Image (spheres, helix red, strand yellow):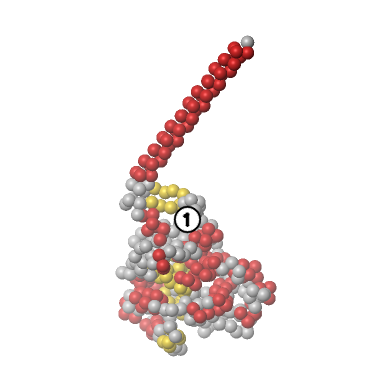
Amino acid sequence: MKAAMADEFKIVLTRKERFLYLAKAVVFLVIFALGVVAGLWTATGPRRCCSTYTNILFPSTTVYRYRGGGGGSFSEFVAPTRLMHDMTDEQLFWRATMAPASSGGAYPFQRVPKVAFMFLAGRGILPLAPLWERFFRGHEGLFSIYVHAPPGMVLNVSDDSPFYGRQIPSQETSWGSITLMDAEKRLLANALLDFSNDRFVLLSESCIPVQSFPVAYGYLTGSRHSFVEVYYHKGKTCRGRYSRRMEPDITLPQWRKGSQWFELRRDLAVAALTDARYYPLFRRHCRPSCYPDEHYLPTFVAMLHGADNSNRTVTYVDWSRGGAHPATYTAGDVTPELILSIRRSEVPCMYNSRPTTACFLFARKFSADALEPLLNISSTVMQY
């Protein structure tokens, strides 16, 4: 009987072994087949067609591949042409502040320095766009445009306009609040995604260029400094806005004020985005009647990057009439004499440590009805 039970156990064991061998063989064949399919898909799929896929490093980012043997993905990485994405600000800032650390500072592509023109369009319109289009015409490849408009609003421009498709993901802003500074940082971050952008200038929908593009481009790319206005006075609109709750990180002697309309070198733009020490203080303590957009960058730059800054702005604004807002130029104010007076300042400024009267490249505020007279004198007075 023991012999019979042993024989029966051997039969059962043999059947189990056969089942295990069969199962292993099936699993191996399935894995092999999947590997073949994946290999064929990689070789012929995304390289030969236009498709999208999710970036593993940035799961919320859609990366686009174009026809042409796979080269499009790298060019899209170094100079994004599609600006809309679903990254959070935190993800965006992290990605934007990446800096190449290989090749000894050299780039694996032909890099031509560009100027990023960043428009903070609070009302979602650019009434002076035709003037800017004339300014940009013929200089493609030397500039990039970024527009922060209210969520849900689409710029009304033709598809051949340099503004077409240049809106970035945006959030609501409120005048005088930290949300304006958030929007400015959002513009900076999106512009930093293009590795060729070397200078970054913030503009409003009421700004105009008072110099030609070649002059403005050479002025900015040839400067050793950024252009952030920095000053201090004891009045209520400067010293009176300081909160001692910012101590000890920011003390009263370090507090500064300046124009909202800045221009930054790439390294300083990266530094502003990576700041996790001072910006939170402005978010918590620079409340209404403090105006973070007039104090954060001037204070930050003066504290940490003073030697790299010119302490002035390249955007002209007329505050001579007093009040909370600068003067607005309407159609009747636009004359060749006005533009020429802005182009050549009565008070010299410093450019690369030398005095000059060419202090301003842009000016504001110009109303929508000023467009036609500006177009009429743009070629003769502003040379574009």
Q: Which quadrant is the N terminus positioned in?
A: top right
The residue at the far top in this view is 1
Q: Nearer the viewer, residue 271 or 174?
A: 271
Residue 346 found in image quarter: bottom left
Residue 373, image x, y percentages:
37, 76
Q: Which residue is farthest right?
A: 245
* Image location (x, y in percent) of residue 143: 38, 68
In this picture, residue 379 sits left or right of residue 250: left
- CA neighbours of label 1 inside 10 A, class few (<14), some (14 to 19), many (20+): few
Quadrant of the rendered image containing residue 331: bottom left
Q: Mark 1 points at which residue?
A: 85
Q: Residue furthest front?
A: 3
Q: Is mark 1 on a helix, strand or loop?
A: loop
Viewer-closest of 170 and 364: 170
Q: In this view, does 321 lie above or below 367?
A: below
Question: Which quadrant is the C terminus positioned in?
Answer: bottom left
Q: Residue at 31%, 69% (x, y): give it.
A: 138
- Image side of residue 4 versus residue 168, left or right: right
Question: Looking at the image, which residue is at 47% across and 77% down?
Answer: 226
Of the residues shown, which amino acid type is indicated by label 1? His
What is the tally of numbered marks visible in this picture? Answer: 1
Residue at 39% across, 75% down: 221
Q: Where is residue 86 in the image (x, y as percent from the top left)?
A: 50, 54
